[in-house]
Amino acid sequence: MLGSVADAEDVVQDAYTRWLATDREAVRQPAALLRTIVMRLCLNELKSARRKRETYIGPWLPEPIVEVEEADSIDDITLPLMIALERLSPLERAAFLLHDVFGLEFEEVAKAIGREPTTCRKLASRARGHIQSARPRFPVTKEHGMKIATAFFAASRNGDMAKLRPSCR
């Protein structure tokens, strides 16, 4: 949701602190309350003035979580999906993740993000459309992709763009 492991850890810690301060005897659905707390903290973080003041030249990419033992089994869609999620508004991202990824009904999504269920349906629909439009136009094998990346890296280091052209075909 936030694109940063550190920010996600801060939100989880803040949510846990709020959970500890809650009268748990009065809570009928702890999971729903925790989802709501976490989602609203994420939305607040995404809208915060601190985040808006941060400037970075160039495209921002979320931090992929890569476990060493899982590095070879990571699905090829992980990074493109993360990039596509970054293009979504905070509310679109929240609605998409809660409904399409975590399988919540739109009524539950609405409670978590403080919007009407019909609005959440529209947000999720828009998010799906943005994610679909961000799909690669044609498949590239991993080997060919690595060849292009290596050639680009070498060309950027030594300035010889001619060596890059044969790799891109």
Image (tube, helix red, strand yellow):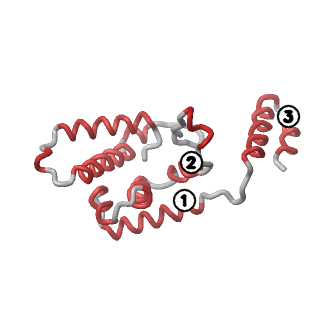
Q: Residue at x 39, y 45 (%)?
A: 46
**Quick one: label 3, few (<14), some, or many (20+) residues within 10 Å?**
few
Q: Quadrant of residue 18?
A: top left
Instruction: Identify the residue shown where x is 33% and y is 39%.
Output: 11
- Real-space Cα separation, disc 1 to disc 2, in angstroms: 12 Å
Q: CA distance from mark 3 to mark 2?
A: 32 Å
Q: Nearer the viewer, residue 70 or 11?
A: 70
**Marks 1 and 3, Cα distance to the nearest angstrom?**
35 Å
Query: Which residue is painted at 30% across and 62% down in the image?
Result: 110
Q: Secondary structure at mark 3?
A: loop
Would you say 96 lies left or right of 168 here? left
- The residue at the far bottom in this view is 118
Q: Position of residue 163 (x, y in %)?
A: 87, 38
Q: Nearer the viewer, mark 3 or mark 2?
A: 2
Q: Are marks 1 and 3 in contact (CB under 8 Å)?
A: no
Q: Which residue is mark 3?
A: 160
